[in-house]
Amino acid sequence: QVQLVQSGSELKKPGASVIISCKASGYTFTTYAMDWVRQAPGQGLEWMGWINTNTGNPTYAPDFTGRFVFSLDTSVNTAYLQINTLKAEDTAVYYCARGQVFLDLWGQGTLVTVSS
Amino acid sequence: DIQMTQSPSSLSASVGDRVTITCRASQGISVYLAWYQQKPGKVPKLLIQSAFILQSGVPSRFSGSYSGTDFALTISSLQPEDVATYYCQNYNSVPRTFGQGTKVEIK
């Protein structure tokens, strides 16, 4: 069926990096862009940006430039979010979502916990 | 950047009540607004796109409307399963900002 399946929870130390994967199935991967959304504990949704699944060109929201990297492997219909130099405030659930405009299909979310 | 201001931040209403959540854009976004529902501990779900187009499978008690830069999500008869936080999102331009969310509870 049509779905996005994300990788599992991660526990990382400050300064480390993490890569979250988002595997799409049930639709043509390159027909839709992939967006990323962050939700800190008890907080609202933050739009991080999106990646064009045809060109691989990423667009980042202003608060997510520098340490955040979107990438793709179209051979396995998978999008990736890499977060470098992790900080405690990066602790959150990260969602991938099919979109480019409105987000009609969401992954189950990946909890990243940053703690020493 | 376009700011999306949602109100109220929370509300408590009785089963069967009519509930309205508003979202104001800081500048014009045409009809490029979506509403999402996030039930406790769950993944957000798209309810409405293009300000008033109901997604397939969404109960008809949900509706969207707009006037200029003011948008509204209405639940015509609140049900227990509607307990959730609701978010609006601008998708007219980047960054595609979300509103702060409105938490809906049953009185």
Image (cartoon, helix red, strand yellow):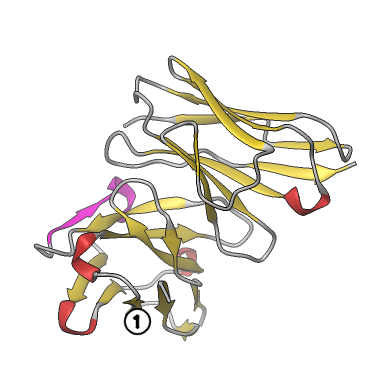
Q: Is residue A103 something one can see in this rendering? A: yes
Residue at 55 percent across and 57 percent down: it is B44
Looking at the rendering, which quadrant does residue A54 occupy? bottom left
Question: Image height check: is A115 above or below A91?
Answer: below
Is residue A6 a member of the stretch shown in magenta?
A: no
Magenta residue span: A57-64
Q: Quadrant of the N terminus of chain A?
A: bottom left
Residue A62: say if magenta. yes
The answer to whether A8 appears left or right of B2 in the picture is right
Of residue A52 and residue A10, the one placed in the foreground of this image is: A52
Which of these two is toward me, A3 or A50?
A3
> Is the residue A84 above or below the residue B96 in the image?
below
Q: Taking the image as drawn, is residue A83 in sight?
A: no
Residue B34 position within the rendered picture, expressed as x and y whole percent measured from the top left: 46, 40
Residue that mark 1 sits on: A16
Q: Is residue A110 left or right of residue A100?
A: right
Q: Look at the numbered disc 1 and give the secondary structure of its residue.
A: loop
Q: Position of residue B29 (x, y in %)?
A: 34, 25
Numbered marks: total: 1
| Viewer-proximal residue among A81 and A96 | A96
Circle 1 marks a residue in which chain?
A: A
Look at 89% across and 37% down and name the residue there.
Answer: B14
Residue type indicated by callout 1: Ala
Check disc 1: other Cα within 10 Å, few if <14, some if 14-19, many if 20+: few
The answer to whether A25 appears left or right of B67 in the picture is left
User: As drawn, which residue projects farthest toward the left?
Assistant: A55
Q: State the image coordinates of residue A77 (x, y, percent, origin top left).
A: 24, 78
State the residue at coordinates (36%, 32%): B32
Q: Position of residue B37 (x, y in %)?
A: 60, 50
